[in-house]
Amino acid sequence: MRNRPVVPTGAPCWVDLWTSDVEGSRHFYSELFGWQAGEPSSDHGGYFMFTRAGHPVAGAMGGMGDAPADDIWKPFFASEDIERTLKLAAERGATVRQPAMAIDDLGHQAVIADPAGAITGIWQPGTFPGFTVIHEHATPSFIAIDVRDYHAEIAFYRQVFGWDPLEEEVDGHHYAGYMDPDSRRPIAGIGDEVESLAPGESPQWSVFWQSDDVDVSVAKLSAIGGTVIIEPADGGLGRVATVADPSGARFRIFQPKG
């Protein structure tokens, strides 16, 4: 387990799901991961949090008015100055989807589409830092994305979020890992394995939820209505499966080596 009461600037600090089936998602993820689904907030469009053992792990909400939910998990990166981060992002090719706004005393949030088109949140913490428990069962392990222009994407996250990733090239593919400053374990990654993207399809961040046993988790997911897109397989960092919830929101289930 890695408990981090303060999230490093530039690091993933939160994820949330914009779901077309709120009640279905509440039941599905609670059964899959043993999460508890909090009560929706009428002051914030029905937004609610999932917790595990009392610790917040993710947020979720449904569509709003004329804006239907897109069934995508979205990460947020920590910022000390959200207005400055938004300015840097816009200057370097991002599109601001939602300008900075205060969420009570919890913090300030904004949403951008990065230069690759991936929907990305920015969070300047107030009283709420985001998820503080990572790298254990049913909590975030890391997030990752594959893009067509790897070098441009890396430059963006270096310049906007201050990343200093560990880069490598294997079999003609590039990969950069943003490492946790304390544990030096990867908590975010960018690669260029885009063979699975359809022409014109925008890349999206993928959340890797850690599991003590990927195969058991995938079997449970299938039994409660989820879809297995890529069966569990061993890779460089561990065993991983690509899956989707009953509404089509994709994510990964991941079991690290060792």
Image: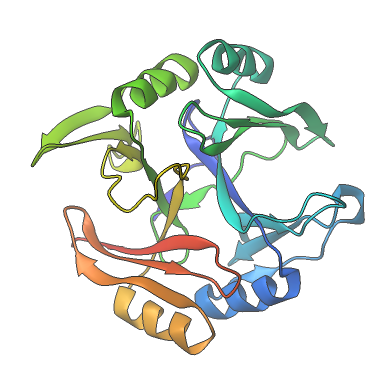
Q: Relative to 237, is 37 on the left or the right?
A: right
119 lies left or right of 240: right
| Image quarter (top left, top right, bottom left or bottom right) of the C terminus | bottom left
**Residue 31 visible to an observer of this rendering:** yes
Q: State the image quarter where residue 77 is shown.
A: top right
Position of 217 relative to 154 (above/below): below
- Relative to 238, is 96 on the left or the right? right
Farthest bottom residue in view: 223
Q: Which residue is at a point 76% across and 37% down the rendered structure image? A: 106
The image quadrant that residue 78 belongs to is top right
Residue toward you, 125 or 205: 205
Task: Where is residue 111? Give x, y as percent.
Answer: 65, 33
Number of numbered discs visible in the structure rendering: 0
Residue 90 lies, in percent from the top left, at: 59, 15
Frontmost residue, 175 versus 141 = 175
Residue extending furthest front? 199
Whether residue 163 is visible: no
Residue at x 47%, y 59% (from the top left corner): 139
Q: Is residue 80 above or below residue 207?
A: above
Q: Position of residue 86 (x, y in %)?
A: 63, 18
Give the residue at x 48% y 89%: 223
Q: Position of residue 15 (x, y in %)?
A: 57, 49
